[in-house]
């Protein structure tokens, strides 16, 4: 049974940077594509960055392209999101998950997420 623990969020001024980390349990982490998702208040959860199982292919939402970088360390079962040039509209709870999201008993499983707030 997989679990995700996100960390690294916080309050940052516009133009600042944060690096999010996600530690995943389970011995088969390396076979899955992983994604970082975010959910702002009152909005749906959206995929913002995706990385292939081997780490060689990445994709980004247009809203973060050129500012965010996703990476992974399969030896550490960890995926990262480097966020630069942050904007107030990046404020959201950020989650990591497999892509597509992991199902447990037929329901999407999500960790606690980590809050990112961009404000002056």
Image (cartoon, rainbow, N blue to C red):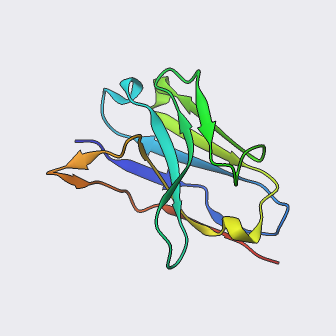
Left or right: where does residue 89 sit relative to residue 27? Answer: right
Q: What residue sits 35% from the left and 56% below the top? A: 110
Left or right: where does residue 29 sit relative to residue 39? Answer: left
- Of the 4 image quadrants, the one containing the N terminus is top left
Name the residue nearer the viewer: 52 or 19. 52
- Relative to 101, say whether 39 is above or below: below
Name the residue nearer the viewer: 60 or 4. 60
Name the residue nearer the viewer: 74 or 87. 87
- Relative to 115, say whether 47 is above or below: above
Q: What x and y, as percent, mark residue 118?
A: 73, 70
Q: Residue furthest front?
A: 62
Q: What x and y, as percent, mark residue 120?
A: 82, 78
Q: What residue sits 35% from the left and 46% below the top? A: 101
Examine the image and state in which quarter residue 73 appears.
top right
Q: What x and y, as percent, mark residue 27?
A: 31, 27
Q: What x and y, as percent, mark residue 32?
A: 39, 29
Q: Residue furthest left?
A: 105
Name the residue nearer the viewer: 4 or 70. 70
Q: What residue sits 55% from the left and 24% below the top? A: 55
């Amino acid at each position: 049974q997989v679990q995700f623990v996100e960390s690294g969020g916080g309050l940052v001024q516009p133009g600042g940077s944060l690096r999010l980390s996600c530690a995943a349990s389970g011995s088969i982490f390396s076979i899955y594509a992983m994604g970082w998702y975010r959910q702002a208040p009152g909005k749906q959860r959206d995929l913002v960055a995706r990385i292939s199982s081997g780490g060689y292919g990445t994709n980004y939402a247009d809203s973060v392209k050129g500012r965010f970088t996703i990476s992974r360390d399969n030896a550490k079962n960890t995926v990262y999101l480097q966020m630069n040039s942050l904007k107030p509209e990046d404020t959201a709870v950020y989650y990591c998950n497999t892509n597509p999201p992991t199902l447990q008993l037929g329901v999407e499983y999500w960790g606690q997420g980590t809050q990112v707030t961009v404000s002056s």
